[in-house]
Image (tube, rainbow, N blue to C red):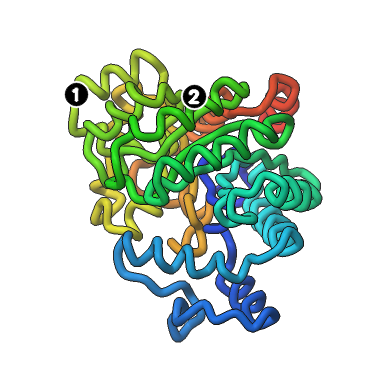
Amino acid sequence: MSWKTFPKIELHLHLEGAADPAFIRGLAQEKSVDIGGIFDEEGAYKYSGFDEFLQVYEAATQALQSPEDFQRLTQSVLENLAEQNVVYAETFVSPDFCGGRDLGAWREYLHAMQEAHVEGVTLKGIVTCIRHFGPDKARETALCAAETAGDWVVGFGMGGAEDAGKAGDFAYAFDMAREAGLRLTSHAGEWGGAQSVWDTINDLCIERIGHGVHAIEDPKLVDYLAETGLVLEVNPGSNIALGVYPSLEQHPIAKLRDAGVKVTVSTDDPPFFHTDMTQEFEQLERVFGWGVDDFHALNATALDAAFCDADTKEALAKTLEN
């Protein structure tokens, strides 16, 4: 069957990282902003390895300079999601790139993002601190999240370079967000090993892990994840593109799922990794033989793990049944 028309839920999508290269290039030209040589001859993002990926990612965000830019970006991302029949998505968005973590500016950017709309797609935001920017800036980001928690801002998370500091360095920021009623997730176990996942669970008390794939190296951790139901936001295409694993055949998503770990599937930063949700499904079918029942089960796991309210979940459940 064609997986393009199959309804999907995506829980791990970076808003800035979902910007098409042509969109960023056009925006930079409009504003006469020099974002450097971040595109290859074919117009795609150009990088080698994770560190350079982060540099290109942050360079691309320099073209995003106003609330209107983020409104246009969000509209573009929603249209791309609709094309893949993603009916619900949660997107990581960083106040670092939206007015430099200034609360007043953040409110303007947030309002602009919420103005974007595409029929049939529900989008919610996870305010995200950037690990390699340090704990102090993470606190400022958490304040932005706490002060704007509500219908659209439903979660708080952390991305960036996993080897920057310790998870516990960011506990204050996560505590702030938790006290504001926000749901919590954090990247771990993408580049760090199983201990990175343990530290994030123990020090930040999150309920989802972004990536988490290196948990497979620790049988006790795999058992813990299966027993507690802590969800992994897995991004197979991203992991292959960045070299976390050499091929999907060697990726642990199927082993984790077979061990009872709750996994979801997302694209992370789709134009950077030349992927989309349809391709993710197609590749999982090709390599692991997953079919309709498996993808229905993935949707059920993702819906249960989503940070949105009960009414939204109920409406989405009906959509997924059709």
Q: Nearer the viewer, residue 240 or 287?
A: 240
Q: Nearer the viewer, residue 286 or 224?
A: 224
Secondary structure, mark 1, is: helix
Foreground disc of the pair 1, 2: 2
**Residue placed under numbered mark 2 in the picture:** 175
Contact flag, marks 1 and 2 (Cβ < 8 Å): no
Quadrant of residue 240 within the rendered picture: bottom left
Q: Position of residue 177 (x, y in %)?
A: 55, 28
Q: In this orientation, does residue 314 appear?
A: yes
Q: Position of residue 304 (x, y in %)?
A: 56, 23
Q: Nearer the viewer, residue 214 or 30?
A: 30
Q: Position of residue 288 (x, y in %)?
A: 34, 42
Q: Residue at x 64, y 83 (%)?
A: 32
Mark 2: give few (<14), some (14-19) or many (20+) Cα within 10 Å. some
Q: Amino acid at mark 2?
A: Asp
Check the picture and name the quadrant holding the C terminus.
top right
Quadrant of residue 253 within the rendered picture: top left
**Residue placed under numbered mark 1 in the picture:** 219
C-alpha separation, residue under disc 1 versus residue under disc 2 = 29 Å
Q: In this orientation, does residue 118 appear?
A: no
Q: Amino acid at mark 1?
A: Pro
Query: Can you name the residue that lies furthest to the bottom here?
Result: 41
